[in-house]
Amino acid sequence: MRELILGGARSGKSALAERIAAATAGEVVYIATAQAFDGEMAARIAHHRARRPSHWQCVEEPLALAATLRAQAGDGRCLLVDCLTLWLSNLLGSGDEALLARERGALLDVLPRLPGHIVLVSNEVGQGVVPMGELARRFVDEAGRLHQALAARCERVAFVVAGLPMILKGDPL
């Protein structure tokens, strides 16, 4: 089972993903893509760590997501990736267009073939105004294209607003 959970900032998408992972019978591996470049982000990461059960494994991977998923996936295992928009930001911030294309392609290629339960969390950023800056517009465009491609490969897609999931594709929660 592959699931994509989308929502805005502080929508409850991570909490929903964690509830889904906790309800699985197997072991959970939390794949974190964030990097703490400032104190505020370090506090956000600490908050997420404190909220997770201590028996969950955690792998921090800001760039090589497909390889990490391939290495960690297995029958009876749930992989929770939080979050894809931070991963995309890391790739865009690298300034390496070939790396971005390679990693995006690798994720889309490997996802349908992974064993186990995969829960992907990402920020929906396409509902606002078109950003004024070139990099911000590029980020919104890349995120939108990534979300569409992932939604096509996932059995369930949810959109979370105010902590309430709306199922866009697949079986109800």
Image (spheres, rainbow, N blue to C red):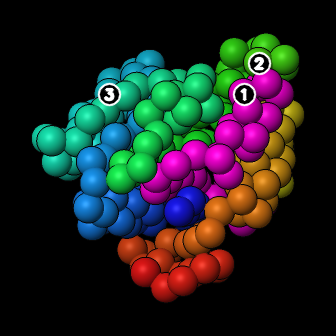
Spatial separation of the CA atoms under disc 3 and disc 2: 26 Å
Q: Is residue 9 above or below residue 27?
A: below
Give how far across and how far down residue 1 sits, in percent: 53, 63
- Secondary structure of the residue carrying tag 1 is helix
**Amino acid at pointer 2:** Leu
Any magenta on residue 119? Answer: yes
Where residue 96 appears, x then y in whole percent?
Answer: 79, 14
Q: Badge 2 is on which residue?
A: 99
Q: Circle 1 sits on which residue?
A: 103
Distance of label 1 from label 3 (alpha carbons):
25 Å
**Residue at point 58%, 46% (across, down):** 114
Please give the name of the residue rendered at 82% of the width and 51% of the height, measured from the top-left corner: 145
* Image spot of residue 166 (x, y percent): 54, 82
Amino acid under label 3?
Answer: Ala
Task: Single out the mark in the foreground, 3 or 2.
Answer: 2
Quadrant housing the C terminus: bottom left
User: What residue appears at the point 72 percent right and 27 percent down from the top-left corner?
Assistant: 103
Disc 3 is placed on an element classified as: helix
78 over 98 or under it: above or below: below
Residue in the picture at 37% in, 28% down: 59
Vertical side of 81 occupied by 71: above or below: above
Asked whether disc 3 touches disc 2, contact meaning CB atoms under 8 Å apart, the reply is no
Residue at mark 3: 42
In the image, farthest residue toward the front: 75
Q: Earlier in the sequence, mark 3 or mark 2?
A: 3
CB under 8 Å between callouts 1 and 2?
A: yes
Residue in front for this viewpoint, 30 or 139: 30
For residue 122: magenta?
yes
